[in-house]
Structure formats: C-alpha cells, structure tokens
Image (cartoon, rainbow, N blue to C red):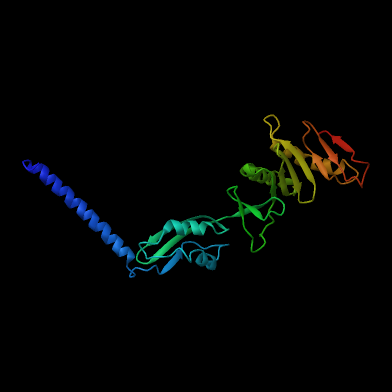
Amino acid sequence: MWNRPQLMKDVSDLLYVAGAAALLVALVVWLARLPMFPVREVVVLQALQEVHRSEIEQSLAGQLRGNFFSVNLEGVRKSLEELPWVRRAEARRQWPSSIEVDIEEHVPVAYWGQGTGQLVNSHGEIFAAEMKDPPATPMPVLVGPHGFVPEMLTYYQQSAELLKPIGRMPRTLSVSPRLALQLKLDDGMIVELGRQQAKAPISERLERFVAYYPTVLTAAKKRPTVVDMRYPKGFALRVNALAAAPESEGKGKP
C-alpha cells in the first residue's frame, strides 16, 4: 500500500470525512445537552372546540424534557393523541424555542349504542369521549356491528335526505348481525327495511315508504308503531297490542 500513493490519498480522505462526521455528531450531542436552548412555548396551530389548553399542558407535562434539540416529538404526538377528543396530532420544532402542534379533533355526528358513552365521528370511527355541551342539533343513535360503522353512517345520511319530503327524521338506525336495517323516526314510528339487495335496494324501499306515508297513517284505525317495508310490492302495519286486536297486521299495496 505504501507504494500506491493514490490509495493512501483515498484512505486519508476517507479518514478525514469520518473524523469530520464524528466531530459533527459530537457537536450536535453537546449542543443538545446544553441548557441554553430551552423549549419556551408550545404553539397550537388551530382553534379547538373540545380540547382545552389545560388538557394539553397536563398531557405534555412529562414530554418536554431536554431542550429544543432533544425533546421527543414522537412522544409529544402520542401523548396528545391519548386525549379523548384528539383524532390526530403532529408536532414539529419551530426555531428558536417553540414546539408547534397540529391537532385534529373528532367531529361527533352520532351516538354509538345505547348508553355506551361512545360517539361516532365524521369519518365513521368510534371514539370514547364526553360532550361538554349538548349538540346544536340532535344527533342520531347508531346500533350495530363495529365493523359496519361507515356503511351505517352512509345509510343514515341517505335516509335523512329521503325523509325530508314528509318532514320526518331518523333518530335511531339499527343493524342486526345479519345486516338488516331498522329506522326509528322522530315521531317514534319504526320502519323495517331489511337487508340491502341488488333487486330491492334500501333506498328504493324507503322511497316507497315516503311515497305512501299518508296511506300508512290512514290504513290502520290506530297510529301504527311499526311499518314493515320488506314486502316487494307492499307493506305491513303493526299497531300497539293495547290499542287494537292482538298483534294483527294489515297489508297495503301501492
């Protein structure tokens, strides 16, 4: 090797680069340990509706160890995402002494189950949180299989739109283990819609219910408690057993 100057030059250059890199790493580590670069503030980039500043401060109390260079941003993110109303969080450094956090809150659109303390957000995800104030508009209740939540949310939104012409709103949408749908309206009436089928879509059955809603109200002597729309060309009515003959059903055809 001593007789090969070019090789010796290459080795020398490599050692020089390695030494410079090691020195740079040592400098960064040294700077990171200095108390002269403290984190002075945490900046939240957006106005928050449900998450309070005090909750953020409490969540990050043990995460801001070290200084501007050494604070664990991943730990900050995970700690924020443990808050009930936080769906997603990001954290980054902002020179010279700030940590910026970007927080996406859950937007509740429905209650999940009966008395579970859980909510459904606008992405069709279930989360556990307590609403500090009642919603501006009443939220529906969704009941069914956990893996079917996005589809249930879609069915609810479609149903609410289709029921507008008769001035009714769905209050509860229930889906059985066999994926049969049932709506409970704001007047207490239950509408059985059954399972989604290519030849008889849920939307088509609900449109038929809307079209013949006046007939539904006059077809029985007493106001029906259940309207069964699972018949291909008609419907069945059920009235309260105390108000009519025992559980008799009347059928109507459009």
Q: Find residue 26 and report its horizontal and vertical position in percent.
A: 26, 59
Q: For this view, does 124 lie left or right of residue 235?
A: left
Residue 163 is at least partly visible in this image: no
Q: Find residue 163 and report its horizontal and vertical position in percent.
A: 72, 45
**Tag count:** 0
Q: Find residue 231 and report its horizontal and vertical position in percent.
A: 79, 33
Residue 141 is at least partly visible in this image: yes
Give the camera-side residue of 215 and 20.
Answer: 20
Q: Name the outermost residue toward the top.
A: 199
Give the camera-side residue of 158 and 190.
Answer: 190
| In the depicted structure, whether residue 182 falls above or below residue 39 | above
Which corner quadrant holds the C terminus? top right
Which residue shows up at 27% across the image and 57% down it? 25
Quadrant in the rendering for residue 150: top right
Q: Name the outermost residue toward the front.
A: 2
Quadrant in the rendering for residue 151: top right
Which corner quadrant holds the N terminus? top left
Q: For this view, does 147 lie left or right of residue 186?
A: left
Which residue shows up at 71% across the image and 32% down it? 200
Q: For this view, does 125 lie left or right of residue 37?
A: right
Which residue shows up at 64% across the image and 42% down it? 148
Give the camera-side residue of 80 and 110.
Answer: 80
Which residue shows up at 50% across the image and 67% down it? 57
Q: Name the outermost residue toward the right.
A: 245
| In the depicted structure, whether residue 193 falls above or below residue 130 | above
Give the camera-side residue of 58 and 239.
Answer: 58
Q: Find residue 103 and report its horizontal and vertical position in percent.
A: 50, 58
